[in-house]
Amino acid sequence: MSQTLAALAVALPLASGWSIHTLWMRHRIDAARRDPLTGLWTREPFEDRARKSLTRGHQQAVYVVDLNGFKQINDTFGHAAGDAVLRATGQRFAAWADANGGVAGRLGGDEFTAITPAYGEQGTVTGNLLVKLHDLLDLLERPVEFDGQRIDVFASIGAARYWRSCGADLSALLRRADERMYEVKQEGGGFSIAPALGSASRLRTVNGRRAGRRGTTSGPGVAA
């Protein structure tokens, strides 16, 4: 009995030490897979998580976000200010994705991505998704304060919807969202939802367009 107790007395601290070491290693690995400026997942770990999300059977939406006029921010206010805008954008985007049960990442530069649940009937633009996009655009376009200066921020967002029957993979969804982002960027910013893949009829697009410089969004859009 005394030998058993002695063995446990030696083993427990070792086991505890290994547990702490394992947790520390996991923390280091996670930190290495996150963008150091924004704290968001980098492309590869984001895509790993997004692909797992697509297998769960829920309706999903994939988003691609780009900041409008980001080069001008760097040129006017300096690269430290640009970093502050990217950091604030990443923090806001992460908070929005988390609140909507999703995950966010940084693709590089001033381009970001996310995936969240998007519930509604197939082939229609759901009110749920429109609310998400309105909220996201409003959140991202709040000014950033840096070194006593107020920096205006503007964004373009493309979204692509998914459900298991549509047959699209993550690469296709990101491409469709990116195409929509680029189109709405050319129009001055806002958001655009790609027509849903795999629907039997009446695929539709909704664009949120800017009225003036900040403006509001509006819909419905045009039939695809």
Image: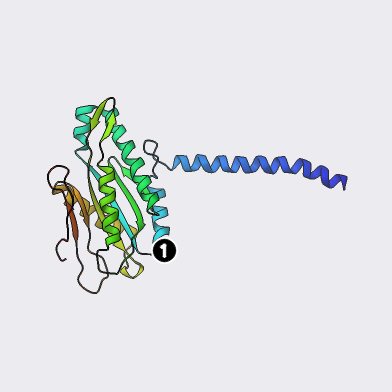
Q: Amino acid at mark 1?
A: Thr
* Residue 103 shows up from this direction: no
Query: Residue tagged by mark 1?
Result: 55
| Residue located 29% across and 35% down the image | 85
Q: In the rendered image, which quarter contains the C terminus? A: bottom left
* Residue 139 shows up from this direction: yes
Q: Mark 1: give few (<14), some (14-19) or many (20+) Cα within 10 Å.
A: few
Q: Where does residue 44 sit, x and y in percent of width and height?
A: 39, 49
| Residue located 18% across and 56% down the image | 207
| Residue located 32% across and 58% down the image | 61
Between 39 and 42, the one lying in front of the other is: 39
Q: Image check: 45 left or right of 84?
A: right
Between 214 and 104, the one lying in front of the other is: 214
Q: In the orientation shown, which residue stands out farthest toward the right?
A: 1
Q: Is residue 38 above or below residue 194?
A: above
Q: Where does residue 160 sit, x and y in percent of width and height?
A: 27, 59
Q: Where does residue 34 sit, x and y in percent of width and height?
A: 42, 42
Q: Is residue 146 above or below residue 163?
A: above
Q: In the orientation shown, which residue stands out farthest toward the bottom?
A: 200
Quadrant hosting residue 78: top left
Between 119 and 78, the one lying in front of the other is: 119
Q: Where does residue 198 sit, x and y in percent of width and height?
A: 27, 70
Q: Image check: 49 left or right of 110?
A: right
| Residue located 27% across and 43% down the image | 140
Way the structure is coloured = rainbow
